[in-house]
Amino acid sequence: MKPRDFRRLSSALKELTPHQRQILIDRLQPAGQSSAPGQLVETRMTEKPSCPHCAGERVSRWGFANGLQRYRCNTCRATFNALTHTPLAGLRHKAKWIDYAKQLVEGSSIRKSAAAVGIHPNTAFRWRHRFLRLPNGQQASSLAGIAEADETYFLESQKGRRQGLSRAPRQRGGKAGKRGLSEEQVPVLICRDRTGNTADFVLEKADQAHIGAVLKPLLASDVILCTDSAKSLATVAKKWASPTVRSI
Ligand SMILES: [Zn+2]
């Protein structure tokens, strides 16, 4: 396109309605180049797409909508995408999902996370509830190829517990009463392989026995597991993820 025509096109964009803008965004982002969350979402379907309405496995690609590949079921003829019938169906601004999820993990307030991600607090509120409703069924049942695992710690939530609080009440969010690791912090193991299979576990204790118990069933025999070599996780990894363990 000539520079002059492009300038004209560019200034005409101001006149688009929200709906027209969305159509243009979709056309500019075919599946292969969609946002990172979009790609992550699509991996659900790429292996073996099946119809969320009738579980039929004969499906055809059926254009794009809202930045996602659409499919049509050859059995019941309903259309769907990778998010149909999940808590994230119909949510917009996918490009901001990963940033928002980080805020959620960090325990930021609705207002703070909305400001950090650049969304309205009402949107942050809605997202919070939808994200937290994602079922554990999305957990990977096995990891293959190159996988990473890491242990992390969350402050245990005692929200709503009126009696038997094991510590003095604190303001929302807040810090652990003791420095370093303590019973207030819950160990969580997060594992992920390069194809996007992810699994996480709340551990009773972050020792070899507990980590081994959840990790071992997940690992394919030839998996290469990258871990932080300083942790007991590395010992477990050496035991179960033969033959190669790489440190990160
Ligand atoms: Zn169907």
Image: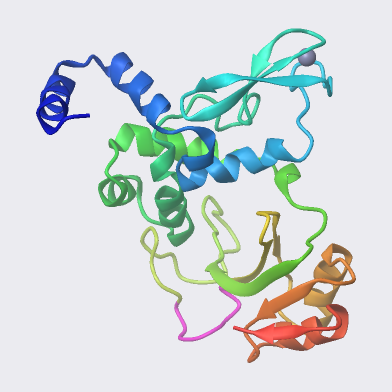
Q: In which quarter of the image is residue 45?
A: top right
Residue appearing at x 87%, y 66% in the figure: 220
The answer to whether residue 68 is above or below residue 212 is above
Q: How many labels does the image show?
A: 0
Write the start and end of the magenta stretch as one range.
177-185
Q: Position of residue 5 (x, y in %)?
A: 14, 24
Q: Which quadrant of the picture is home to ligand 1?
A: top right
The answer to whether residue 125 is above or below residue 105 is above
Residue appearing at x 21%, y 16% in the figure: 16
Residue appearing at x 56%, y 19% in the figure: 63
Residue appearing at x 56%, y 54% in the figure: 161
Q: Position of residue 168 (x, y in %)?
A: 45, 70
- Magenta span main SS: loop
The answer to whether residue 193 is above or below residue 80 is below
In the drawing, does residue 102 fall left or right of residue 41? Answer: left
179 part of magenta stretch: yes
201 part of magenta stretch: no
The answer to whether residue 87 is above or below residue 223 is above
Q: Closest to the observer: 124 or 191?
A: 191
